[in-house]
Image (cartoon, rainbow, N blue to C red):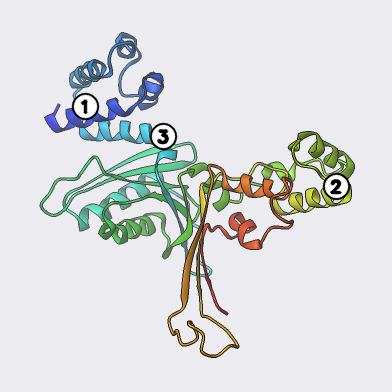
Amino acid sequence: MDENVAEFLRRIILKIPLCEMKTILEAWDFLSEDQLQTINLKQRKEFLAQELILLCENKCARLDDVALLDIVSTQFHRHQKLWNVFQMSKEPGEDVDLFDMEQFQRSFKRILQRALKNVTVSFRVYENSVWIRVAWGTQYLQPNQYKPTFVVYYPQTPYAFISSCHLKSTLPLLHQALKVASKHQQIVQLDLRSRHLDSLKAIAFREYNQTFENYNSTMSLHEESLGLEINSNSKIIHENTEERVRIHRVTQETFGAYPQPQLEFAQYKLETKFKSDIAGGILADRKEPLRCLVKFSSPHLLEALKSLAPAGIADAPLSPLLTCIPRKKMNYFKIRDK
């Protein structure tokens, strides 16, 4: 096994938590079951890495094999990356083509390798998606295996999810390969990004309301408000039962009864010009617009927003700018004067 490949494998092994090592190695499916049984998972990780390198050397592991392990490890820790959502489109009236996975992979790889001499492309089909790992080089430098770009594409859908790329100059080439291989004409980046890949997929495919569609709508409003009262913060005093019921109803109408997709932030850029009837003010002659940035952050932003009105922190209903995030598939907004 090449020295660089061995070092690449060692670094991947050192990143994997010991409690997940066996599961990830089994999902990799490169080492046999008998070989996996011989591994001592209770030793120091540095020694474990050396043991695994020897096993992989005996099987003549190549760069593609180790890159596949990197994909598997990334799938297990996909929420450690920041993902951007891209939407593709076909020409109006164009028929939907049958998807051929082998043809997709050949086309994607061929486009990148024709345009760039040094690039490594690896694939792994996982459930209903294809995971693509691209390690970028230059015309003179070998691909950097430690800063790859990951693409998650769901066949026969217009959506792809791409991790943040450290080489911005490679993005147009990546988009071109994705368009051609998936037989689309256009690709645009949505103002939607998060570390929670599963939630981004739920928002893009509108899967977040499946629980709500099965919600028992025959439950009386009194029963719902009774459940709310039991679970509410005991420190908050509700003086008006009818208002409490109204807030609960409006919250359910706005957010639904299903769990919200998990996003960590929403960002609003405001750009407006100063307006005043009073002449001679400090800002009266300002030609440049006033700009400000507001960012809401939370480990689970939409659930936090959903709880504001019932907790008595905000009025119901909340501003549509806060509640429209899943519907508009956006968590980056630009607000300008009409």
Q: Quadrant of residue 72?
A: top left
- Please tell me whether residue 35 is drawn above or below residue 16 in the rendered image: above
Q: What element does badge 2 sit on?
A: loop
Q: Report the amino acid beneath label 3.
A: His
Q: Quadrant of residue 223?
A: top right
Tell me residue 192's x, y (percent): 49, 56
Left or right side of 140 for 319? right
CA–CA distance in space, label 3 to label 2: 46 Å
Q: Report the amino acid beneath label 1.
A: Ala
**Quadrant location, the N terminus:** top left
Depth check: 276 or 14 in front? 276
Residue identified by numbered label 3: 77
Nearer mark to the viewer, of 1 and 2: 2
Q: Residue at x 59, y 45 (%)?
A: 261
Q: What element does badge 1 sit on?
A: loop
CA–CA distance in space, label 3 to label 1: 23 Å
Task: Categorize mark 1 by other alpha carbons within 10 Å: few (<14), some (14-19), many (20+).
Answer: many
Residue identified by numbered label 2: 239
Task: Categorize mark 2 by other alpha carbons within 10 Å: few (<14), some (14-19), many (20+).
Answer: few
Q: Earlier in the sequence, mark 1 or mark 2?
A: 1
Q: Label 2 near label 1: C-beta < 8 Å?
A: no
Q: What element does badge 3 sit on?
A: loop
Residue 294 circle label: none
Q: Earlier in the sequence, mark 3 or mark 2?
A: 3
Q: Report the amino acid beneath label 2.
A: Glu
Task: Categorize mark 3 by other alpha carbons within 10 Å: few (<14), some (14-19), many (20+).
Answer: few
Residue identified by numbered label 1: 61
